[in-house]
Amino acid sequence: MTDSFYWIPEETSEDISRALTALSVEFPFSKYEGTKKLTFRRHDFLSVQNQGQEVIICFDSLASALRGCGFALAGLSVSEEHCCFQKFGIMLDSSRNAVMKLPCAKSLLRKLALCGYNWVMLYTEDTYILPDEPHFGAIRGGYTFDEIKELDDEAGKLGIELTGCIQTLGHLQTFLKTAGAADVKDTSEVLLAEEEKTYELIRKMLHFWRTACRSGRIHIGMDETHDLGRGKYMNKHGWKKGFEIFNAHLQKVCALSREEGLAPMIWSDMYFRMGSATGSYYDPKAVIPEDIRNGIPGEVRLVYWDYYHADENFYTAMIEAHEAIRKQTVMASGIWTWYRLCYDHNYSAVRVVPCIQASRENGISDFFFTMWGDDGAYCSFESIFAGLIWGADIAYGSEGNNAEKLDLLSKSIGCKSWKQALKASEMNFSSPLRDNGVGTLSILLWDDPILGIGWRFLDCDEPSIYTGLESALLKGTEGLTEYPYELSAGDFLLAKLRLRKNLVDAWMAKDKKRLHELRVQAIPDVLRKLAGLEQEFRKQWTAHFKHNGMESVQVRFGGLSARFRELAMRIQEVEENENIGFPELEIKKDHRCDPVSQKYADFALSGI
């Protein structure tokens, strides 16, 4: 018999009672009736005591009280926990094609509440609908005002602050491709500064979020504007220093934010990049002139994003550098989901732990995990909860290594097996020669089966690399029953990997019999597995996201299928005419022409 839980409203604070009512839509909580009573007591930390027919939850915040309810669902007792952050949240990327359906988004909010989160940012570049701006977010599945208002109402019941995370300068390439953006376009990604029509557009953005959400805060973005002022702006105004254009624009956007009653925050990287001789965000020698520092509006909070470093001392140094510019730094770490087919735990863990530790020791009050969808948002949605549940465990002071606890908590809040998610994560093999943030599985997935750019990039001709990849795929898919998308991906990638190796070996040996076997047996098998993966991809996408954006990945699947069929035809031509060669397979790796890039997948997919 599954336990159900009840609370006595007269004995429970109004905010907890309201949150439990919201949770009861999906979880076994109800007023007055149930098998176990929930009793809440204010304390200095979170503890959960299971005492027969009563669960006593001592809490120090609404977020910790609801996390205690998650433990109650799992039948777990907790002696002492305390979150080191006042605001602890996630940033959900809704701009890389995947715009979450409202029912799924509401369920996500409930699960986050049961993990102890109290802040959610929606990263929406142009995936929300602005009045009188028909090109803004056109055919992108953007959120309507009513949809955001509905999500904010749900979040408010759960004690979660819903904050818009938008862009008011760069990262607007999708919108800027449209005819409606001609008057506000500086470059392909950056808005035109010092243009009144630009500020009319931004005024609409800010008004949308101020009226749709309770939050008095707004993340206005402004990161990675590398070519600021070098397009139409330069034609109109001539050359100016990036610092000057950036600060002047920020001051105008902040003035508009004040009019709306919003407190802005920005990604901090451009100040450090413009102060670096190498243009690096993480340059310890970056110098930001005093007049530029003084020109930053006083209400702006800097968001330090770092998903890459494994050294606590580095985080501390960067936090100190941020605090020297502006106090109350916000920290953004990363649950690695981008350029991945599933959550990458090993890659995340070695970066998240030192980041949280440095943030804790340096008094950071606001902390969130990003979950980017770069390259098409094809990461398994179900797998991300393994990272979110584990990340919350770290933030609340645990070690994050109690697999039984995390697995019970995961299943009790309606997620899949935490243990199996970590097993699937083992497929995220990182080549010892290649570690630049681009997931190995993504490189293998989209690699052209004839050109083999990714094969060479990963040095798969090296026996140890090939063996490591094969072993990781076998280990990650073994016994994987709850994650069909990841299982299909592993099966396809393993078949594709073996096909490539056998293809190269057979061609180099000029073994036409083996080539024939690949054509009539291995390639049809790979195509069947690819079709199965595409089907599982569609299932997991349509279960969680609006249909818009799915086409970008489906087109890639179609391209892969065409290239495998082309490979079969090429082999048949070689079989029939010994004078026809396979020059693509004979190209030797040349490290002078090595496509090492954060945008590797785009490079490998050119032409698909």
Image (spheres, rainbow, N blue to C red):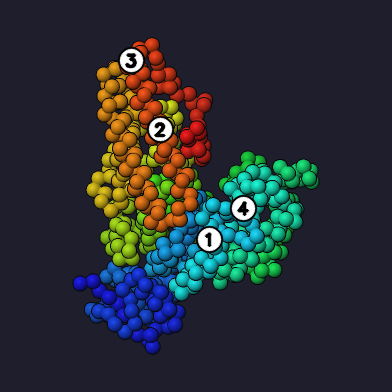
- Element assignment for label 3: helix
Q: Earlier in the sequence, mark 3 or mark 1?
A: 1
Q: Amino acid at mark 3?
A: Glu
Give the residue at the far right of this rendering. Answer: 237
Looking at the image, tell me whether mark 1 or mark 4 is earlier in sequence order: 4
Task: Tell whether 479 sits left or right of 57.
Answer: left
Q: Is 519 rendered above or below residue 122?
A: above
- Reading the image, the residue beneath label 2 is 562
Q: CA distance from mark 3 to mark 2?
A: 21 Å
Closer to the N terminus: mark 2 or mark 4?
Answer: 4
Q: Are marks 2 and 4 in contact (CB under 8 Å)?
A: no
Distance, label 1 to label 2, CA atoms, is: 35 Å
Q: Which mark is residue 576?
A: 3
Image spot of residue 11 (x, y percent):
38, 87
Q: Quadrant of residue 579?
A: top left
Cα distance in 3D space between marks 2 and 4: 33 Å
Q: Which of 214 and 523 lies nearest the eye of the viewer?
A: 523
Dot 4 lies on which element?
loop
What is the three-letter code of the residue carrying label 2?
Ala
Q: Position of residue 51 (x, y in %)?
A: 25, 78
Element under label 2?
A: helix
Task: Identify the secondary structure beneath mark 1.
Answer: loop
- For mark 4, does the 10 Å Cα neighbourhood hold few (<14), some (14 to 19), or many (20 or more) residues? some
Residue 135: which disc? Answer: 4
Label located before the other in sequence (1 or 2):
1
Q: Name the disc covering residue 143, or none.
A: 1
